[in-house]
Amino acid sequence: MSLRNFFCPDSVAVIGAAREEEKVGHIILDNIINSGYKGKLFPVNPNADEIHGIKCYHSVLDIPGDLDLTIIAIPVQFVLQVLEECSKKNTKWSIIISAGFKETGIEGTKRERQLIEKAKEYGIRILGPNCLGIIDTECPINATFTPNIPPMGKIGFISQSGALGTAILDWAKTNKIGFSKFVSLGNKADISENDLFDDWENEKDTEVITAYLEGVKYGREFMKISSRVSKKKPIIVIKSGNTDAGARAVSSHTGTLAGSARAYEAAFKQAGIIRANTIRDLFNYATAFSYQPLPKGKKVAIITNAGGPGIMATDECEKNDILLASLEKETIDGLKEFLPEAANFYNPIDILGDALADRYKKTLEVVIKDNNVDAIVMLLTPQAMTQPYRTARAIVEVIGKSGKDIPVAASFMGGAEVKKAVRFLAEKNIPNFDIPEEAIDTLKVMMEYTDWKSKKEFPIESFDVDKESVERVFGRCRAEGRLELGEMEAREILKAYGIRVPEAELASDIDEAKEIAKRIGYPLVLKIVSPNILHKTDVGGVRIGIGSEKELEEDYDEILFHVRKYIPDANIRGILVQEFIKDKKETIIGMSEDPQFGPMIMFGLGGIYVEALKDVSFRIAPLSRQMAGEMIEEIKTTKLLKGTRGEDPSDIESIIEIILKVSQLVIDFPEIIEMDINPLFVKKQGEGSIAGDARIRIGG
């Protein structure tokens, strides 16, 4: 459903339009009037005949004709009754400002559930409850209880916090940052960020989508919508609540390392959402996207009147893998014609501290023609002879005449001396950053978004697997009252999905272990098998590299001694005698169920050090081959897999294939809550990978 009549309704009723100036209903009515709203406006108050000379209706039912939008700002106990009255006026949209719903506890949650049920029954879409309202600068309408309406612009902003929303509106107004729309989500009982992203995809007034979110509703739908919309428009989100406070019932390495913050990071990355760490970052990015074209490459030219800021910008470029453009000979020769001999004609271009506006102008005229330059950063520090305002005018003039579709960012550093210039730049759609690093960081984000827009989408592959075997294993474990699958069951499941495991057999005593050893051959690995033991290494339940029968006897006894010492009541089903995998690297592939986004796949350095080093990457399943490859590239130790100091490269393609098979497994069987393949032994290129150990936990 299009939200056009929601943001710019033909008729609005303010229910609870109080006569007292300090009351919310009165303020909302004032703001609608003062914003220049051109539609029909109906105040509703049973105790008033008129407010501000506008006829006041005692009930919604008294209003002639239908209503597009109702704004409800009344005590919570009357909201449901009024919503029913709104349905009789064929209302399609309702903004519920009233508080007293789920934010207040159990009773409020019940009340909100009733509200949702009734709204669905009446066919009314709800924003809120407990929200600030909406602003549309194009319509125009300010249906909030804050007077701070920002200038008209191309940025749509969503806030899950009303208090933060009011602060941001004030900040935007002060800094002349233009908004197209502002939405306070409140409790998100109905209309959520998903609805707004979906609607703004093709909404011409909004070119940049921004949001402050504390959480998302319907995570997988959020990813689906965002992935599509972000290919057309940048979505910039600041997400709070990034720490994973509180205990979780986790028993795998993946579960320990995963968490809400990791899930959001993975989801945002896969959906092309730009993550802002601060409100300042949010609007640095938003204004740049709103004002400037996207860079076509990653080569930047820096023009400065001081060496220090130029070096700072250069360092930040290197830190962010941004290239300093190699200027064409024609550009360098052109600069030499007018710049002082002491200037630096190469990049960064230092035009010296005595540079007036005309020197900035001539330099930019030459550099902006250079085909090697994808973006330009103009740095200015106010010195005795500097002309900040004239320089700003010169920059705008050159850009206007150049005809080049190239982003230009400014960093006019200082306060009072550059204030007028900075204001002029903003009016002419040139973003200014307080420090050079912010300008470079913003260009980096724009370059990454350029890459995202052109990124090819790969299909989700499907492997021929044996689902029936997996179902039998799960059924057997449930029948025994077990949700934690040990290594023996996990091996069966991995084999059913075509994942190679070492040759192994279960021994019930030392004599049987010796017979198995003869069949498999030395060296060997021994592992305790018990449903009571999840992490075998922690209780001395693993021995590796056993090279002879004598060692086998000693290690077999050692395992039993240590296990009985640490867990006397453990149900020991035997000891697994397994082939020893030589010439390999140890990695880990795991999965943890996230409550918002579903199965989250992990890859990283394996073995006993995974939790200590935390060199891991995450994605939300299902994964494409491209995503699996990116996971491997992201870890810091990926160079070890590619081969260092003469080592042969590891079989990275086999890792990718196993990641994809695990992805398919957890999608096929959503009852899997956690799993680890740790270690995954990765052999040399062409020799494959082998799941050395595995465990799985399923839901009841």
Image (cartoon, helix red, strand yellow):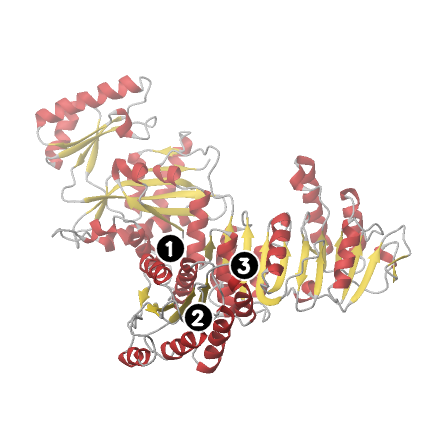
Residue at 59% over, 67% down: 153
Report if residue 194 is visible in the image. Answer: yes
Residue type, numbered disc 2: Val
Instruction: Report the disc number at residue 210.
Output: 3
Q: Which residue is mark 1?
A: 623
Q: Say few, some or many: other residues with alpha carbon within 10 Å of mark 3 (under 14 / 14 to 19 / 20 or more).
A: many
- How far apart are the alpha carbons under marks 2 and 1? 37 Å
Would residue 562 be found to the left or right of residue 149 on screen? left
Going from the N terminus, do you reach mark 2 or mark 1 first? 2
Residue type, numbered disc 1: Leu
Are discs 2 and 1 less than 8 Å apart at CB? Answer: no
Location of residue 42 (image quadrant): bottom right
Quadrant position of the N terminus in the picture: bottom right
Q: Which residue is mark 2?
A: 408
Location of residue 590 (image quadrant): top left
Q: Say few, some or many: other residues with alpha carbon within 10 Å of mark 2 (under 14 / 14 to 19 / 20 or more).
A: many
Q: As displayed, is residue 295 above or below residue 658?
A: below
Q: As displayed, is residue 526 above or below residue 410?
A: above
Residue type, numbered disc 3: Thr
Are discs 2 and 3 less than 8 Å apart at CB? Answer: no
Between disc 2 and disc 1, the foreground one is: 2
Q: Position of residue 307 (x, y in %)?
A: 34, 62
Instruction: Return the residue nearer the eye: 548 or 453.
Output: 453
